[in-house]
């Protein structure tokens, strides 16, 4: 396919260009005889190269870890051999010391052997109980140092003040005396105190009843509730009568008198309904009686 395209690139006629137009930049390069880059192959090659580098790095890390592990094992074996050699040398030294007749040489060699054993023996790991005991001792020492400058006199005095006083049980003689002093009305409120409380309650009720209402406009008074209820009942009865008068009118209202009567009944019903809305409220304010009489 590429050979055919390269072979036809020498045809420079306009008809050939019109019949076989260019499809893009890569098509123009092929017509000019150039080979375009294969980016897919290049990217695949870069990916494989990156994979080889990562694999090589992984193998190097594994080799380093293996070498480090071998060095650590060698140190442990070396330390074990040194301990074994030390014990054998100490035993040989002990044999020589037992064969020597001198007491001074035996003591010196035994001390040397104990010192060598101490150097080659690891320190004992403390148990959990010993660790907890050390922690408790440290806390106790810290608390002791913290309480070194405490005023124990003031602390004890404040502790005694805060305690609840103890109540002593009365003696039999005190019980008999207290029972002898009791009368038959012991523990009851006296009658004069009850009467005084009732009088005070009545005065407080009268005072609250005579207090001016905070919602009352200036120059007006609160209508008594019974009067308001009676007025509301009268208004509802009047509204029912007016409604019956409206129902008594003919269906066709043609004359002037009928129109006037219907208009008057409608206006009266509207006034009564507005008054019912006002008197249906819990509080109704009105002018004082003196102002109404004047």
Image (cartoon, helix red, strand yellow):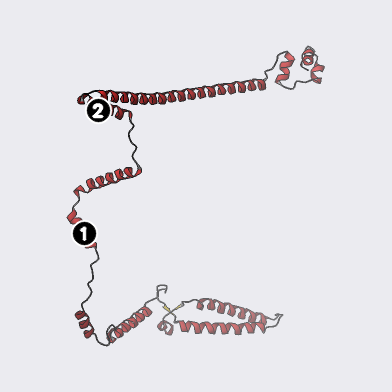
Q: Is residue 87 left or right of residue 239?
A: left
Q: Position of residue 176 (x, y in %)?
A: 21, 83
Residue at the outermost left position:
153
Give above or below for 224 relative to 73.
Answer: below
> Would you identify the image quadrant in which residue 204 lies?
bottom left
Give above or below for 164 relative to 227.
Answer: above
Please tell me which residue is depicted at 20% across the width and 26% down the height of the picture. 103
Q: Residue 129 has which mark?
A: none
- Lower position in the chain sequence, tag 2 or tag 1: 2
Q: Position of residue 288 (x, y in %)?
A: 41, 81
Q: Residue 111 has which mark?
A: 2
Q: Could you classify mark 1 by the number of other residues whose Cα lies within 10 Å: few (under 14), some (14-19), or many (20 or more)? A: few
Q: Where is mark 1, residue-wise?
A: 158
Residue at the outermost top position:
10
Q: Position of residue 3 (x, y in %)?
A: 78, 14
Please tell me which residue is depicted at 26% across the width and 25% down the height of the picture. 98
Give above or below for 121 relative to 278.
Answer: above
Give above or below for 140 relative to 105.
Answer: below
- Residue closest to the eye, 14 or 234: 14
Q: Quadrant of the C terminus?
A: bottom left
Q: CA distance from mark 2 to mark 1?
A: 62 Å
Q: Position of residue 237 (x, y in %)?
A: 57, 84
**Mark 2 secondary-structure assignment:** helix
Closer to viewer: mark 2 or mark 1: 2
- Residue closest to the eye, 234 or 41: 41
- Number of numbered discs present? 2
Please tell me which residue is depicted at 81% across the width and 20% down the height of the picture. 19
């Amino acid at each position: 396919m590429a050979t055919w395209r390269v072979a036809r690139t020498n045809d420079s006629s306009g008809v050939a260009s019109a019949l076989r137009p260019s499809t893009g930049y890569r098509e123009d390069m092929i017509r000019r005889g150039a080979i375009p880059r294969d980016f897919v192959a290049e990217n695949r090659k870069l990916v494989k190269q990156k994979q080889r580098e990562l694999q090589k790095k992984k193998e190097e890390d594994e080799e380093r870890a293996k070498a480090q592990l071998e060095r650590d094992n060698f140190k442990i074996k070396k330390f074990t051999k040194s301990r074994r050699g030390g014990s054998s040398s100490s035993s040989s030294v002990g044999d020589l010391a037992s064969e020597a007749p001198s007491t001074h040489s035996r003591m010196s060699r035994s001390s040397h052997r104990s010192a060598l054993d101490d150097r080659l023996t690891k320190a004992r790991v403390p148990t959990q109980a010993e660790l907890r005991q050390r922690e408790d001792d440290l806390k106790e020492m810290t608390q002791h140092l913290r309480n070194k400058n405490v005023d124990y006199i003031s602390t004890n005095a404040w502790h005694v003040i805060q305690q609840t006083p103890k109540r002593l049980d009365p003696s039999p003689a005190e019980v008999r005396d207290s029972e002898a002093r009791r009368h038959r009305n012991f523990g009851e409120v006296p009658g004069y105190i009850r009467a005084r409380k009732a009088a005070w309650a009545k005065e407080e009720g009268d005072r609250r009843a005579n207090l001016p209402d905070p919602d009352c406009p200036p120059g007006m008074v609160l209508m008594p509730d019974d009067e308001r209820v009676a007025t509301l009942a009268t208004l509802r009865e009047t509204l029912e009568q007016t409604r019956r008068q409206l129902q008594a009118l003919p269906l066709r209202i043609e004359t002037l008198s009928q129109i006037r009567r219907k208009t008057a009944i409608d206006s009266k019903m509207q006034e009564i309904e507005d008054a019912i809305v006002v008197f249906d409220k819990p509080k109704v304010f009105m002018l004082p009686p003196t102002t109404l009489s004047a």
